[in-house]
């Protein structure tokens, strides 16, 4: 029982973010992701696909397992984690991986597949990696705890899967694809913003940001519509920067490979 309810296996007191174990996990996740992606470059497409399906299945399993454990054991015992609808449903930006990945893996329509791929390697991949740092800060749990370990593992996997897709060429990113990825994001944003407005929750932190402590000084001093404009713009800029970085890096590497062959 203590495994699920103890905020730290080492018996320390918080805060737990930005400690040696936090940075160690991020470093290991980054290294493992890069190595896995490079090694899979030599594998057939069907092998890469199996790995991606396994990662997606693992993400879904550990999230369902987390909520099962929390419903049964934790909410009455875990420090600082009372039952709270704003934390319950998997509707934040990183959660969208679970819903979009099947379209990338099993989709038949090429526009749908392209939209899913673009969304995953821009918005989702970067938000997953950023959350390894900042999203962990408000969890009131160290990496050495069930909830802390789940949080870090979950976000590491949704970073690693799109990284594998790009590095292996499973998804051959094209310049025009970004419009499909952004359209996917905006559809989710409108639906979730509407849900936030109706329920008073703050999924994706796009309604008024009252649960997003990192930027507390902004959302406490602006109207929620201004906050929405700021956050949606940040998502879009993040996607654009990531997309064009990957695109131009791919073009540079391809040109370098051709020059190497010709010389």
Image (spheres, rainbow, N blue to C red):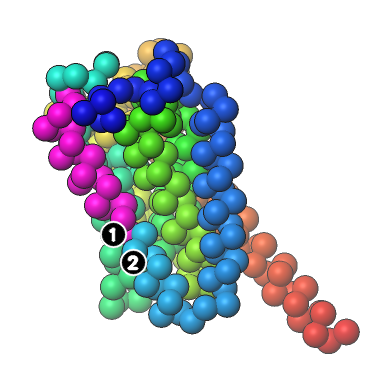
Are there few (<14), some (14-19), or many (20+) residues within 10 Å of tag 1?
some
Residue 92 point in image, percent of width and height: 30, 39
Q: Is residue 216 above or below residue 157?
A: above
Q: Nearer the viewer, residue 31 or 164?
A: 31
Residue 213 point in image, percent of width and height: 40, 19
Q: Nearer the viewer, residue 226 or 141?
A: 141
Q: Which mark is residue 57?
A: 1
Q: Nearer the viewer, residue 101 or 150?
A: 150
The residue most toward the left is 72
- Mark 2 — residue? 53
- Is residue 205 found left or right of 175 in the rendered image? left
Are there few (<14), some (14-19), or many (20+) residues within 10 Å of tag 2?
some
Q: Is residue 213 above or below residue 25?
A: above
Pointers 1 and 2 in contact (CB under 8 A)? yes
Quadrant containing the C terminus in the rendered view: bottom right
User: Residue sitting at 39 percent across and 73 percent down?
Assistant: 49
Give the extent of the magenta segment.
56-75
Quadrant containing the N terminus in the rendered view: top left
Residue 98 point in image, percent of width and height: 28, 54
Is residue 68 in the magenta section? Answer: yes
């Amino acid at each position: 029982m203590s495994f699920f309810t103890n905020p730290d296996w080492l018996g320390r007191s918080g805060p737990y973010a930005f400690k040696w174990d936090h940075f160690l996990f991020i470093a290991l996740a980054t290294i493992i992701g890069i190595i896995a992606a490079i090694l899979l470059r030599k594998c057939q497409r069907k092998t890469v696909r199996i790995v991606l399906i396994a990662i997606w299945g693992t993400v879904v399993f550990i999230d369902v397992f987390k909520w099962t454990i929390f419903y049964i054991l934790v909410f009455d015992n875990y420090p600082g984690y009372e039952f709270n609808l704003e934390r319950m449903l998997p509707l934040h930006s990183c959660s969208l991986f679970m819903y979009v990945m099947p379209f990338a893996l099993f989709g038949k329509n090429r526009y749908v597949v392209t939209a899913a791929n673009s969304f995953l390697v821009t918005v989702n991949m970067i938000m997953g990696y950023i959350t390894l740092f900042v999203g962990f800060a408000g969890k009131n749990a160290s990496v050495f705890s069930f909830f802390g370990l789940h949080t870090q593992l979950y976000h590491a996997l949704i970073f690693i899967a799109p990284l594998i897709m790009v590095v292996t060429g499973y998804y051959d990113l094209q310049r025009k694809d970004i419009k499909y990825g952004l359209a996917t994001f905006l559809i989710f944003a409108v639906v979730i913003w509407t849900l936030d407005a109706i329920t008073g929750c703050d999924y994706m932190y796009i309604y008024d940001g009252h649960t997003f402590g990192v930027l507390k000084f902004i959302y406490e001093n602006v109207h929620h519509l201004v906050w929405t404009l700021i956050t949606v713009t940040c998502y879009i800029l993040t996607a654009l920067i990531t997309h064009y970085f990957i695109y131009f890096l791919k073009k540079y590497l391809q040109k370098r490979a051709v020059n190497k062959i010709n010389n």
